[in-house]
Image: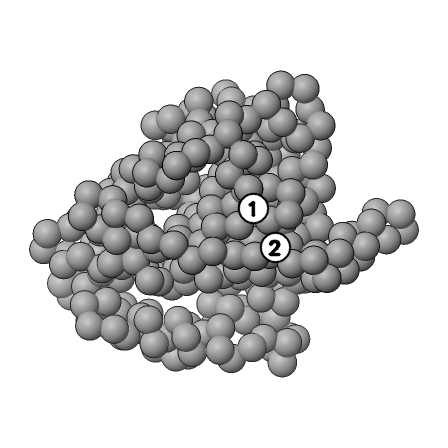
């Protein structure tokens, strides 16, 4: 009861005193990267990496709720949101390359040490960043960001034929991926409370997905996703070896990444904090206050730990 009251109090305070969000861009190797930013850059930094087919927009509410105490930075990947979408002939849309661009982004905005908060595509991007620069990562937050085979839903079996023969299956895979029905289903999943979801969530994403050039961009990343599964063992070994403070927040109605994927984190890090919420793949669609309360409490624990989050080097530009 006490923790519930604290969560409600936090949610009410966040809604009443929403932190302002700034919408900025920065040049990274000639690519205009759009990003959202909230909070004082002298405070501990949280780097928020979005999923597909979303953008940093998915974090707007969380930035407003936590930006009074922390420095939050949420970029759009190339080809997503309001960032540039370079021609796939000239820019490789792979997770390796997205991670490299995000590293250069953190350099450009002066975010040298941070908590990684990752959702969906954010997990393979973020794990690559973590392995490349482990000294930069102070803690990990996974929100339906999967790195375990146990978490792969039945839909992933449909990807295997595409990975084995791209030319034979690409047209069908892309058509489904760009459809209104599939875009809606990513949000609602198996949640019976479908009336709680704002249709703008998927209609806006549908519009972005069907911009010129998006079919090839999305196809390249879906095809490259097979390399994420191949890297799971390496990422799990890193999690086990590093034992970083870890928060796992999972919407249980997700059809892509299922609850066993959330619970598997405790196998490699028994201290990982796991919360299963009554929501979908983008759990903040309907459970923003809960996610903000849980994440705020987790970050608060880091701040009070000697030499940990509280000792973060200030970000600067």
Is 101 positioned to the left or the right of 121 in the image?
left
Could you tell me if residue 106 is visible in this image?
A: no
The residue at the point 27 percent across, 68 percent down is 173
Label 1, secondary structure: give it: loop
Is 59 positioned to the left or the right of 168 in the image?
right
Measure the alpha-carbon separation of dots 2 and 1.
7 Å
Could you tell me if residue 247 is visible in this image?
A: yes
Q: Which residue is mark 2?
A: 19
Q: How many marks?
A: 2
Q: Which mark is residue 93?
A: none
Q: Position of residue 307 (x, y in %)?
A: 62, 19
Label 2: how many residues lie within 10 Å, few (<14), some (14-19) or many (20+)?
some
Q: Position of residue 46 (x, y in %)?
A: 52, 40
> Relative to residue 295, is residue 290 depicted above or below?
below
| Occupied quadrant, residue 12 | bottom right
Q: Position of residue 13 (x, y in %)?
A: 75, 56
Residue located farthest toward the right when viewing the structure as drawn:
1
The residue at the point 49 percent across, 61 percent down is 58
Q: Position of residue 70 (x, y in %)?
A: 60, 41
Q: Nearer the viewer, residue 116 or 127?
A: 116
Q: Which mark is residue 39?
A: 1
> Relative to residue 49, is residue 243 depicted above or below?
above
Q: Quadrant of the C terminus?
A: top left
Q: Nearer the viewer, residue 65 or 289?
A: 65
Q: Nearer the viewer, residue 19 or 235?
A: 19
Label 2, secondary structure: give it: loop
Badge 2 or badge 1: first in the primary sequence: 2
The residue at the point 51 percent across, 79 percent down is 199
Label 1: how many residues lie within 10 Å, few (<14), some (14-19) or many (20+)?
many
| Occupied quadrant, residue 133 | top left
Q: Are marks 2 and 1 in contact (CB under 8 Å)?
A: yes
């Amino acid at each position: 009861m006490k923790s519930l009251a604290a969560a409600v109090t936090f949610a009410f305070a966040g809604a009443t005193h929403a932190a302002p969000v700034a919408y900025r861009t920065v040049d990274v190797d000639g690519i205009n990267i759009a990003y959202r930013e909230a909070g004082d850059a002298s405070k501990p930094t949280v780097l928020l990496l979005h999923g597909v087919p979303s953008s940093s927009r998915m974090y707007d509410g969380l930035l407003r709720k936590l930006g009074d105490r922390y420095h939050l930075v949420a970029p759009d990947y190339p080809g997503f949101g309001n960032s540039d979408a370079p021609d796939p002939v000239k820019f490789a849309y792979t997770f390796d390359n997205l991670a490299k661009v995000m590293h250069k982004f953190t350099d450009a905005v002066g975010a040298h040490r941070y908590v990684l908060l990752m959702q969906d595509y954010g997990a393979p991007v973020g794990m690559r960043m973590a392995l490349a620069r482990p000294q930069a990562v102070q803690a990990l937050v996974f929100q339906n960001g999967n790195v375990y085979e146990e978490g792969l839903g039945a839909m992933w079996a449909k990807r295997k034929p595409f990975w084995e023969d791209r030319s034979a299956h690409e047209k069908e895979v892309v058509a489904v991926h760009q459809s209104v029905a599939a875009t809606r289903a990513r949000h609602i999943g198996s949640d019976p409370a479908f009336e709680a979801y704002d249709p703008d969530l998927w209609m806006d994403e549908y519009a972005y997905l069907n911009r010129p050039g998006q079919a090839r961009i999305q196809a390249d990343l879906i095809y490259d996703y097979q390399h994420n599964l191949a890297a799971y063992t390496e990422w799990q070994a890193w999690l086990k070896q590093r034992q970083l403070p870890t928060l796992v927040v999972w919407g249980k109605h997700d059809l892509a990444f299922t609850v066993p994927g959330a619970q598997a984190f405790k196998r490699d890090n028994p201290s990982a904090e796991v919360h299963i919420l009554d929501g979908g793949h983008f759990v903040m669609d309907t459970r923003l206050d809960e996610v903000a309360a849980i994440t705020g409490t987790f970050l608060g624990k880091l701040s009070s730990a000697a030499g940990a989050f509280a000792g973060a080097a200030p970000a600067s530009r």
